[in-house]
C-alpha cells in the first residue's frame, strides 16, 4: 500500500505470499490499492495458500498497471515450505533467479 501511495519509494517489489484475503474470507479482498501501484512487482505464491488461490491472485495482479509476474510454487501453502525442517534451497534459488531476471528484463 505504501508503494502505491509513494511510487518513488522503491524501484520494484518482491512480494512473498501476498495475503490477498483472510483464510476462508474471500469477500474481504485487499486489492483497493493495486490499481495505483506503478512499480514492477514479482509475486511468489503457493498453489495451496489459504490467503488466496492462484486464480484470485491472477485476477488481483491484473489490476496493477505496472509490469507484474506471478511465480507459482506448486503444493506450497502460505509459508512457501519454509516451516519444513530443511529450508528449500531449490525454491530460494528459483526465487532469486526469477527476481534477477524480472528486473534485468525491466532495465532493458
Image (tube, grey):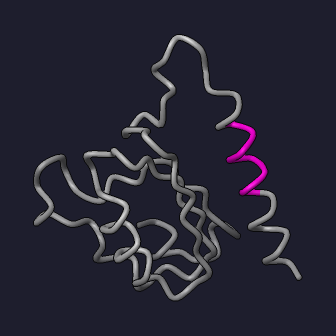
Q: Nearer the viewer, residue 37 or 9?
A: 37
Residue positioned most to the right: 108
Q: Position of residue 103 (x, y in %)?
A: 78, 68
Residue 88 location, quadrant: top right
Task: Say whether residue 54 is left or right of residue 105.
Answer: left
14 falls in the magenta region: no
- On the rendered structure, is 86 left or right of 74? right
Counting from the top left corner in percent of width and height, residue 78 is at 37, 40
Farthest residue toward the front? 74
Point 37% across, 61% down: residue = 54
How many numbered discs sit on the rendered protein? 0
Horizontal side of 37 relative to 30 (left or right) equals right
Q: Quadrant of the N terminus?
A: bottom left
Name the foreground residue: 9 vs 13.
13
Q: Could you tell me which residue is drawn at 51 percent across and 88 percent down? A: 65
Quadrant housing residue 77: top left
Residue 58 spot, x, y in % from top left: 40, 72
Region in magenta:
92-99
Q: In the rendering, at what x and y percent does residue 53 appear?
A: 30, 58
Q: Residue furthest top?
A: 85
Name above or below for residue 52 compared with residue 8: above
Give above or below for 44 relative to 36.
Answer: above
**Quadrant where the C terminus is found in the figure:** bottom right
Which residue is at 46% across, 52% downward?
45
Residue beneath the point at 40% across and 84% down: 63
Vertical relation: 31 (above or below) 15? below
For the stretch drawn in magenta, the main secondary structure is helix
Residue 97 belongs to magenta span: yes
Amino acid at each position: 500500500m505504501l508503494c502505491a501511495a509513494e511510487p518513488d519509494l522503491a524501484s520494484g517489489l518482491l512480494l512473498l505470499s501476498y495475503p490477498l484475503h483472510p483464510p476462508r474470507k474471500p469477500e474481504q479482498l485487499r486489492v483497493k490499492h493495486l490499481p495505483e501501484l506503478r512499480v514492477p512487482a514479482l509475486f511468489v505464491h503457493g498453489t495451496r495458500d489459504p490467503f488466496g488461490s492462484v486464480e484470485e491472485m491472477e485476477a488481483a495482479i491484473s489490476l496493477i498497471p505496472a509490469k507484474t509476474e506471478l511465480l507459482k510454487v506448486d503444493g506450497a501453502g502460505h509459508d512457501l515450505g519454509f516451516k519444513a525442517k530443511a529450508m528449500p534451497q531449490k525454491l530460494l534459488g528459483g526465487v532469486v533467479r526469477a527476481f534477477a531476471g524480472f528486473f534485468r528484463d525491466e532495465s532493458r
